[in-house]
Amino acid sequence: MATKNPPFKIILGSSSKARREILSEMGYEFTVMTADIDEKCIRREKPEDLVMALAEAKADAIVQRLPTGGPLEEDASTTLLITADTVVVYRGVIREKPTSEKEARDFIKGYSGSHAAVVGSVVVTNLATGKRCGGWDSAEVYFLEIPDEEILVQLNTI
């Protein structure tokens, strides 16, 4: 796919391989900056509120690290910062990134033959104006039985 040259620059505020692949597959050129925040310090009761708070916190952290602690001086009028977050809600419990291979295996095994909701957010910040727009969406995912062998394959792709 040909690279698109939009009239703006994009900073992807994420270390997510999947998010990089999505923008690349859409043909966009972008740079990557990570927020390096402690996501566990940000808590909300509702998953929708949590993913929005995390995406906004990531944007705030990245904006503070930009030159002069604010919007980019050079080409700021054409730079958009995209941040995002995703959680899974399984049996009423919010699950974030697993902290170990064992936890990841347990998560996947639990989804086998069951279902979970995926809640994700995206926040876009115009670095020239500081204007920020964002939103969240959710999807219910239904799983067939997942054989142990497939769980091992999936763990090796993470």
Image (cartoon, rainbow, N blue to C red):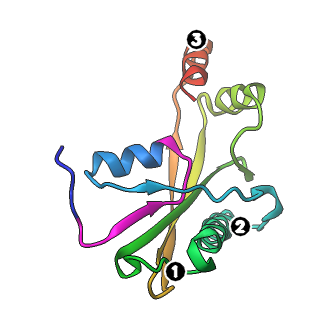
Tell me what residue is drawn at x 46 percent, y 43 percent. 18
Where is 60 relative to 144, above or below?
Answer: below
Question: Three-letter amino acid code at disc 2?
Answer: Lys
- Give, as a single range, the part of the protein colored magenta: 6-17
* Mark drawn on residue 46: 2
Left or right? Give the position of 70 relative to 105: left
- Of residues 108 and 103, which is closer to you in this image? 103
Where is 129 relative to 101, above or below?
Answer: below
State the CA–CA distance, disc 2 to disc 3. 34 Å
Q: Residue furthest top?
A: 149
Tell me what residue is drawn at x 77 percent, y 31 percent. 100
Tell me what residue is drawn at x 49 percent, y 41 percent. 17
Label 1 vs label 3, nearer the camera: 1
- Of residues 153 and 107, which is closer to you in this image? 153
Residue, disc 1: 71
Residue 75 place in picture, x, y as percent = 37, 76
Residue 3 place in picture, x, y as percent = 21, 51
Q: Secondary structure at mark 2?
A: loop
Which sits earlier in the primary sequence, circle 2 or circle 1?
Answer: 2
